[in-house]
Image (cartoon, rainbow, N blue to C red):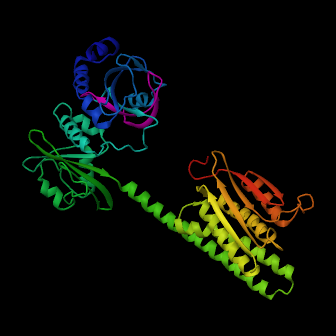
């Protein structure tokens, strides 16, 4: 099939076609190693290509229902293939559309003849919804060890060693006598970077191991497989050792440079610490302001002035709650239930010093989910105002005991929080609608939370509910 297609649709020589035929024989082990669909395309006289060989994986579903051998690979549907043919370089992680109109991610390697001409391309495809930015090429389950060992044996065969150049890891094969019998170009480059002057091919394994690589002894050592991470010459390396059950082969070392990954992890840790410190300082500043207001309140003789200062202090502390929680976790999100529980405790502490005769129970119930810092701050202020209103007005006179219930409901697009009491209620027609507290609530719900606010009051109590659009970290839904 490969020969017939190449002779009919391409200008490849008999020698070129023989090279393509030899490579096509090794596609199946590579498909199982990669858990991906593998193809070889050859160039047409036009800028398109034709599929001359394919292999589907045995262990995961293929992206294809039918064979695509003999079908065209249009350049506008498979830009990675077109780019590799045009430039003669590998193309990594590009989107493509298959002949069955499925979206996939392609990695393409050029196949050259002895004169350096690109006579075909080796294509690796995975479904777009399953692909990762940097896919793990080797899968570490006990079943995979045997698959890897088998694939490596095929890779390093005399007519298929080119396959070892298609993986993103350094590969070293050590024979049963303890000498390096094979290494790909990535392995050579890695050892030069680590300080080796001469080619490692043919050297004793102990010679290349004793200076730089400790014996891999990971916690997952089973069935001839071990893994370890080491830091060498300012680089972080993940080393995997796999015993090979092939004639003349002892074991393989697969070495991945994970320096970039480790550096990103360090950056994330540093950013997390910086975020924690920032929120810690903001919290301290807010608490300092609250303390100054408390001192001013104690000096004030007018009761109305004291009340205004106390309310301002309570609002500042409600904002500080969010920053206190953020300073503990180091990320820009907090659990809404934890915020409200802190608001509840602070408010009850404040009112216990002022209304000593009131015995009011505050209950928090419902869902818990994460919100970002801005949303959390606005919610904290709104709940603080509504809870203060209930504690201040609902249980005056004979109603010195009661319950305030704060209910949290997480919706798909909008979530809601209800503050409900069983107090004496108030006449909504006569109640002033422009108090500072309700003005703050309306402004925050409308402008900051992109939601709505409603309040209902009867002789059996008052129920205030506000909805807010979800700005959670998980997808900004």
92 in magenta: yes
Determine the residue positioned at 45% across, 21% down.
100
In the picture shown, does residue 373 fall above or below 277? above
Res. 43 image quadrant: top left
Q: Quadrant of residue 382?
A: bottom right
Can residue 466 be seen here? The reply is: yes
> In the picture, which quadrant includes the N terminus?
top left
Q: Nearer the viewer, residue 437 or 215?
A: 437
Where is residue 137 shown, x and y percent of the image? 32, 42
* Position above or below: 98 against 323: above
Q: Residue at the spot x=48%, y=23% of the render?
A: 101
Name the spot of residue 7 as percent of width and height, x first: 29, 13
Q: Is residue 25 magenta?
A: no
* Residue 122 makes an appearance in the image: no
**Residue name at image x 21 percent, y 32 percent:** 160
**Outermost residue, right direction?**
430
Read off the magenta span.
88-115
């Amino acid at each position: 099939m490969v020969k017939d297609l190449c002779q009919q649709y391409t200008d490849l020589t008999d020698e070129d076609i023989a090279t393509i035929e030899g490579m096509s024989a090794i596609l199946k082990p590579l498909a199982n190693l990669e858990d991906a669909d593998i193809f070889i395309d050859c160039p047409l006289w036009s800028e398109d290509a034709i599929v001359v060989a394919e292999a589907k994986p045995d262990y995961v579903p293929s992206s294809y229902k039918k064979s695509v051998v003999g079908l065209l690979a249009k350049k506008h549907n498979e830009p990675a293939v077109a780019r590799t043919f045009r430039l003669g370089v590998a193309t990594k992680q590009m989107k493509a559309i298959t002949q069955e109109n499925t979206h996939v991610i392609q990695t393409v390697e050029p196949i050259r003849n002895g004169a350096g001409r690109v006579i075909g391309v080796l294509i690796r495809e995975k479904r777009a919804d399953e692909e990762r930015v940097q896919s793990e090429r080797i899968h570490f389950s006990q079943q995979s060890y045997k698959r890897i060992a088998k694939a490596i044996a095929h890779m390093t065969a005399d007519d298929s060693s080119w396959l070892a150049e298609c993986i993103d890891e350094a590969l070293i094969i050590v024979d049963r006598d303890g000498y390096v019998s094979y290494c790909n170009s990535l392995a050579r480059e890695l050892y030069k970077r680590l300080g080796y002057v001469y080619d490692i091919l043919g050297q004793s394994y102990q010679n290349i191991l004793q200076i730089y690589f400790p014996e891999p002894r990971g916690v997952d050592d089973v069935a001839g497989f071990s893994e370890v991470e080491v830091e060498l010459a300012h680089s972080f390396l993940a080393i995997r050792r796999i015993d090979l059950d092939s004639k003349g082969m002892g074991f393989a070392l697969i070495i991945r440079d994970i320096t970039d990954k480790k550096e990103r992890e360090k950056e994330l840790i540093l950013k997390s610490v910086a975020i924690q410190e920032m929120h810690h300082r903001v919290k301290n500043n807010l608490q300092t302001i609250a303390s100054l207001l408390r001192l001013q309140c104690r000096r004030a003789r007018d009761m109305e002035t004291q009340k205004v200062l106390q309310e301002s202090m309570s609002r500042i502390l409600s904002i500080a709650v969010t920053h206190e929680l953020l300073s503990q976790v180091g990320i820009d999100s907090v659990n809404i239930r934890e915020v409200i529980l802190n608001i509840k405790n602070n408010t009850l502490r404040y009112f216990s010093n002022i209304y000593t005769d009131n015995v009011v129970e505050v209950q928090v119930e419902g869902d818990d989910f994460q919100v970002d810092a801005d949303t959390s701050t606005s919610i904290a202020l709104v709940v603080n105002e509504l809870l203060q209103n209930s504690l201040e007005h609902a249980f005056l006179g004979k109603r010195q005991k009661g319950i305030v219930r704060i209910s949290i409901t997480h919706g798909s697009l909008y979530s809601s929080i209800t503050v409900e009491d069983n107090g004496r209620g108030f006449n909504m027609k006569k109640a002033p609608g422009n108090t500072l507290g309700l003005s703050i609530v309306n402004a925050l719900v409308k402008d900051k939370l992109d939601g709505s606010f409603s309040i209902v009051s009867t002789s059996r109590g008052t129920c205030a509910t506000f909805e807010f659009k979800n700005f959670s970290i998980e997808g900004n839904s």
